[in-house]
Image: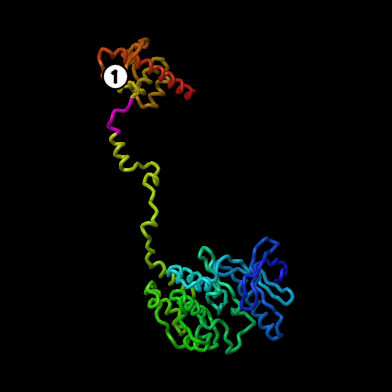
Amino acid sequence: MIKQLGRYEIIGELGQGAMGVVYKAKDPLIDRVVAIKTINLGLAQEEKEEYEGRFYQEAKAAGRLSHPHIVTVYDVGKSGDIAYIAMEFLQGRELREILNDGQRLPVDQVLDITAQVALGLDYAHEHGIVHRDVKPSNIMVVRDGHAKITDFGIARMASSAIRTQTGMVLGSPKYMSPEQVMGKLADQRSDIFSLGVMLYEMLTGQAPFTGENVNAIMYQTLNTVPPSPSTLNPEVPGMLNFIVAKALAKGLDDRYQNAKEFANDLRACRNAMPHPSVSFDAVKPQPALSAQIPDAIPAIGRAEADADESRPVPTMGLSTAFDSFGATMRLAAMTNDEEAIEELSKTFKMVQPTMSAINQAAPVDAKPKAAAPAPAVARHDKTDEPAVKNGNLMLIMIIALVLIGLVLAFIS
């Protein structure tokens, strides 16, 4: 295995391409891993010119394209008898490899992949490039389900100096369009037919046109109509049968005229499909409403809260008639601080008390009894009321003085 191609350091071999080896390499200038596609030019002069021309045509075609569903080409070069293209290194699998696993992909996933490829082809067609070799081995599916088109090796550009000879067939027989089979000039509708063949195979697990040899396959491509995909896969919706039939129409005018129309129908079909059923065990429990809305109270908790509102509020031994705002106002009035009284009146939205109201309060110097048990407060025994009032008043005074100090500090 070679160790170097131009400035690229070869890391390993990824596989054999149609015209050469594909390597994994590193670009030391920007520390990027790339895929290097090569072609050995040690051929006869006539073959060398043809292969080298087609190779550089691929680089030129793909290098002009920048699209999420087309592999990105970074560089092209030549080292001795080896020409190479440095392109985006994709971590995924060829669609061909996925299909070879023998298990059919879910219909919605097939629609997603095909629509992505159709959008990539539409972009290439808008730039005057027809791929002419759309097939599963030229589609890469990366880990997130993203599809990318690779290998524009036999692409035809409108401005290309290289022309396909009359009667010369290029492409893979199973995926060729009727016009390719007959050696006619292929346009964007030829790529649509090939993508339709690929779609049919993904849905049913078999190609629509088969045979023991290339001639038999070509005959079927020109003359036979394959059975509807739903007859081979009952999960295929009826709408998709019509989409496939339109993509595989023999006549160019009966086919999709551009890949964007094809992609739009595929996405419409995808959106019309019912969502896949989920087993009960797989459904995750939804968070409680109180977890979704922080201030919410569950129904049972709300009922308990409503019941609690009707219960007496614990008073820590103080009378239930204790009014902290009123007491604070009265104590402020006793200090003869008119500004504090006015400010408190505004703050608590209370009427400023008169001195007569203040005089009606219990004497300030009254001392509470040594023990004023909570039960006596609960019973409101008349004989103990003066002692309770005195004890409450002293506590009120202490609280009020603290509050007044804070208010005065705020005002100043």
Count the labels in the image: 1
* Residue occupying the point 30% across, 37% down: 304
Span of residues in magenta: 308-314
Q: Is residue 246 visible?
A: yes
The residue lying toward the viewer, choosing from 396 and 42, is 42
Which image quadrant is residue 48 in? bottom right
Q: Secondary structure at mark 1?
A: helix
The vertical placement of 332 against 117, above or below, is: above
The residue lying toward the viewer, choosing from 80 and 16, is 16
Q: Is residue 356 visible?
A: no
Residue farthest along the right direction in this orientation: 80
Label 1 environment density (alpha carbons within 10 Å; few <14, some 14–19, many ≥20): few
* Residue occupying the point 42% across, 20% down: 340
Q: Position of residue 236 (x, y in %)?
A: 39, 73
Q: Which residue is mark 1?
A: 375
Which image quadrant is residue 57 in? bottom right
Q: Position of residue 310 (x, y in %)?
A: 27, 32
In the picture, measured across the screen, residue 251 lies left or right of residue 139, that is left
* Residue occupying the point 50% across, 79% down: 194
Q: Position of residue 299 (x, y in %)?
A: 31, 43
The secondary structure that most of the magenta stretch takes on is loop
Residue farthest along the front direction in this orientation: 102
The vertical placement of 309 against 367, above or below, is: below
The vertical placement of 100 against 344, above or below, is: below
* Kind of residue at disc 1: Pro
